[in-house]
Amino acid sequence: MTTEATSSEVEEFLRGSSDEVAAYLKNSIPVIQQLPEKLRHPDSQEGTALLASAVQGLGLLNDYLQALQAIPRIVQSGQAASFAEIERKMGEGIQQMATAMEQQDQLLLADIIEYELLPALGELQHHVDRLSS
């Protein structure tokens, strides 16, 4: 029994996972876009609840980005570098978010989401839409 995936299995995984990520991004980006405004109002508990969901989803997106970079077709097409750069940007944003949360700095957290994270998610969405098409 072999554990290596065939080319068609890899392509099927790529299409299926990219379709799922594209749908996730389509639904989550509008919600995440609301986060900075909600976080800038400290009396709002809604921002904190949305943030918890967003952080969980970001971890899954990071896993997806890492998996993509190992797929031969992605590597050969040169897209792996783009996905690595998006992963780097998201990783930096998540680290900055963690620091802002530790410091309980809602304004900094809102700025990181608005100016660091959302642009990276938009870039990811662009690339994923191309893969799932």
Image (tube, grey):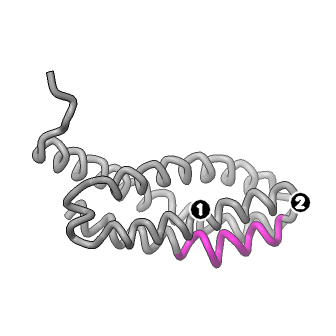
Which of labels 1 and 2 is toward the front?
Answer: 1
Q: Secondary structure at mark 1?
A: helix
Q: Is residue 48 or residue 82 the one in the foreground? A: 82
| Residue nearest the observer in this picture, 70 or 96 | 70
Instruction: Report the side of 71 relative to 31 (left or right).
Output: left
As helix, strand or loop, the secondary structure at mark 2 comes to loop
Q: Classify residue 86 as left or right of residue 77.
A: right
Residue 104, above or below 123: above
Residue 17, position as x, y percentages in the image: 30, 48
Residue at figure coordinates x 74%, y 53% from the top left = 46
Q: Quadrant of residue 84?
A: bottom left
Pinpoint residue 105: horizontal percent, then vertical percent.
86, 65
Depicted 56 relative to depicted 89: above or below: above
Where, by quadrant of the figure, is residue 111 drawn?
bottom right
Q: Position of residue 96 (x, y in %)?
A: 73, 65
Tell me where the magenta segment starts and ends, as one range: 106-119
**Residue type at mark 2?**
Gln
Residue 113 covered by magenta stretch: yes
Q: Which residue is mark 1?
A: 91
Q: Is 97 colored magenta in this rendering?
A: no
- Name the residue at 22% across, 57% down: 72
| Pointer 2 residue | 103
